[in-house]
Image (cartoon, rainbow, N blue to C red):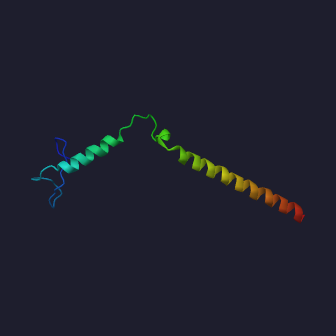
Amino acid sequence: MCPDGGFHTGYDQTGTYTGTRENAETISIAIIAISSLSTTSPFAFPFFSIPLWIIYLYAGLAVASVAVVITVLVLERRKRKTVM
């Protein structure tokens, strides 16, 4: 990074940017990336920006998974009772 805030993309074999100019495209991409990091939400992950269908999908999958586990446990218990 340059003292005035710009970014150099041209470096020589020793790893310095002496004699090269700043790159406007790289600077603009960096500014866009940094500005997208700022958020107005106090949460690190914006939970309320998730579409509702995704929340319903995962809730449904969780309920279905619990139902399958309970069914398997009940069937195994009945199987053990009939064997004895």
Query: Closer to the camera, 4 or 32?
Result: 32
Residue 82 pos. (x, y %): 89, 63
Residue 10 pos. (x, y %): 16, 56
Query: Closer to the camera, 21 or 31?
Result: 31
Q: Quadrant of the C terminus?
A: bottom right
Rendered position, 67 above or below 49: below
- Residue 80: name its quadrant: bottom right
What residue lies at 50% left-to-right and 40% top-to-bottom? 47
Rendered position, 38 above or below 60: above
What residue lies at 79% left-to-right and 56% top-to-bottom? 74
64 on left or right of 21: right
Circle count: 0
59 on left or right of 27: right
Question: In this view, which residue lies farthest toward the left?
Answer: 19
Residue 4 pos. (x, y %): 16, 41
62 on left or right of 18: right
Question: In this view, which residue lies farthest toward the right?
Answer: 84
What residue lies at 46% left-to-right and 37% top-to-bottom? 43
Question: In this view, which residue lies farthest toward the bottom?
Answer: 83
Rendered position, 81 above or below 39: below
Residue 58 pos. (x, y %): 58, 49
